[in-house]
Image (cartoon, helix red, strand yellow):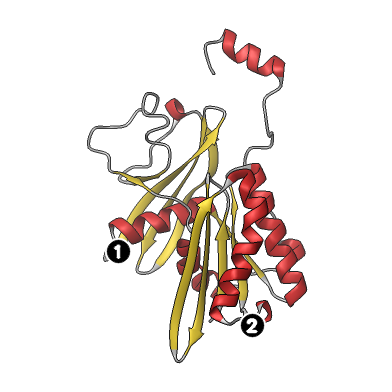
Amino acid sequence: MNLLAFDTSTELMSVALSHESGGQTRESGFEGPGGAQASATLLPTILQLLDQAGLRCQQLDAIVFGCGPGSFTGLRTACSVAQGLAFGAGLRVLAVDTLLAVAEDARHHYQPDATTCCVQSLLDARMDEIYAASFLYQHGQWTRLLEDALCRPQDLALTADAALAGNVFSVYSDRLILPAHRTCWPARPTAQALLRLAPALLKAGQAVAPELALPRYVRDKVAKTTQEREAALRQGVS
């Protein structure tokens, strides 16, 4: 199976290509700055990886992207590139929850041999908030325990017996209220994690036509108004 995956939902851009060659599955990838830079570098990076592999976009089976939650600009960049490539090549698109990708990245790096793994994924949402969701891994399959949510770090409700994974621990160390024994794993929604998740999600029929692949924002506001920021400061919340 030939798959292209990318994520630009965080401060890092991650791109990976998996393709069949000579009876073997080969994988290549690239990581670089995300944010606003990804809008200029994502497409050239994708084209370079395809060229190095000797593939045309039409030879892919699907395009996989991290659909959010995450940076609004990053999500729009990834979605628009996925849609544009898929339209031109006649492909379907697989939009994958970035919090699920965080859970898979953590499992792969910290418990690769475990048959059961419970992970609560946490991503920095900026504006002094975090995105959170919980997942259970059993015998090669992920099941969602809690839907994606947005909360302040100090208000995070912990999932029992779940390891925590994400990019929030240094940013919100003074506000996350965590038991001393709780496992915390640095993790990100990498393109490699998307590639590992893709086969099962494709088999489950979750790929869609390009026009139906949309970002998952969770937060429905990009920024606070001046009045909201001033009110927050008066209440002692930044």
Q: Taking 107 as reference, is 71 above or below it?
A: above
Disc 1 residue type (three-letter) = Pro
Q: Position of residue 29 (x, y in %)?
A: 48, 66
Q: Position of residue 212 (x, y in %)?
A: 74, 62
Residue at the farthest bottom position: 22
Q: Position of residue 126 (x, y in %)?
A: 55, 32
> Quarter-wise, where is residue 107 in the image?
bottom left
At x 43%, y 42%, the residue is 167
User: Is 180 in front, or is 73?
Assistant: 73
> Quarter-wise, where is residue 166 in the image?
top left
What residue is pinned by disc 2? 59
Q: Helix or strand or loop: what does disc 1 sit on? A: loop
> Quarter-wise, where is residue 136 in the image?
bottom left
Instruction: Classify residue 82 as left or right of residue 170.
Output: right
At x 49%, y 62%, the residue is 30
Q: Bin the neighbour count of mark 1 within 10 Å (Cα to Cα): few under 14, some 14-19, many 20 and up.
A: few
Q: Bin the neighbour count of mark 2 within 10 Å (Cα to Cα): few under 14, some 14-19, many 20 and up.
A: some
Disc number for residue 112:
1
Instruction: Classify residue 178 as left or right of residue 76.
Output: left
Query: Tag count in the figure?
Result: 2
Q: Earlier in the sequence, mark 1 or mark 2?
A: 2
